Image (cartoon, rainbow, N blue to C red):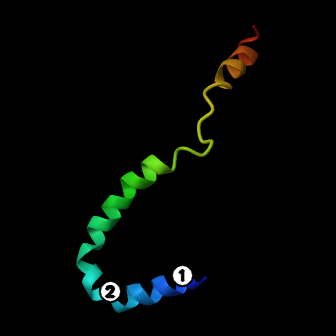
Amino acid sequence: MFIAIAAFYGVREHFNHLYPYWPYLILLICPLMHFLGHGHGGHAHGDQAETNKDTNGK
């Protein structure tokens, strides 16, 4: 909670310095979320062969 409060006041005090860079920061966040957001159990390629076997009746 202390970090959240400190971040709020830090951004509030330095908003005029950060404001011109917001578009660049948002564009930087997009690839970071893409690379870091796929590692937590999103894709299950190993189960796909079993699913195909069951639906084809083999």
**Residue 20 image offset from top left, x and y in percent:** 23, 77
In this rendering, would 22 be left or right of 53?
Answer: left
Count of numbered circles on the image: 2
* Label 2 crowd (10 A; few <14 / some 14-19 / many >=20): few
The residue shown at (30%, 73%) is 22
Element at label 1: helix
Q: Which mark is residue 15?
A: 2
Quickly name the residue at label 1.
4
The residue shown at (43%, 49%) is 34
Front-lying residue, 50 or 17:
17
The residue shown at (55%, 44%) is 39
* Label 1 crowd (10 A; few <14 / some 14-19 / many >=20): few
Front-lying residue, 55 or 6:
6
**Residue 56 image offset from top left, x and y in percent:** 71, 13
- First in sequence, mark 1 or 2: give its number: 1
Amino acid identity at mark 1: Ala
Residue 2, placed above or below residue 21: below
* Quadrant that contains the C terminus: top right
- The part of the image, by quadrant, that contains residue 46 is top right
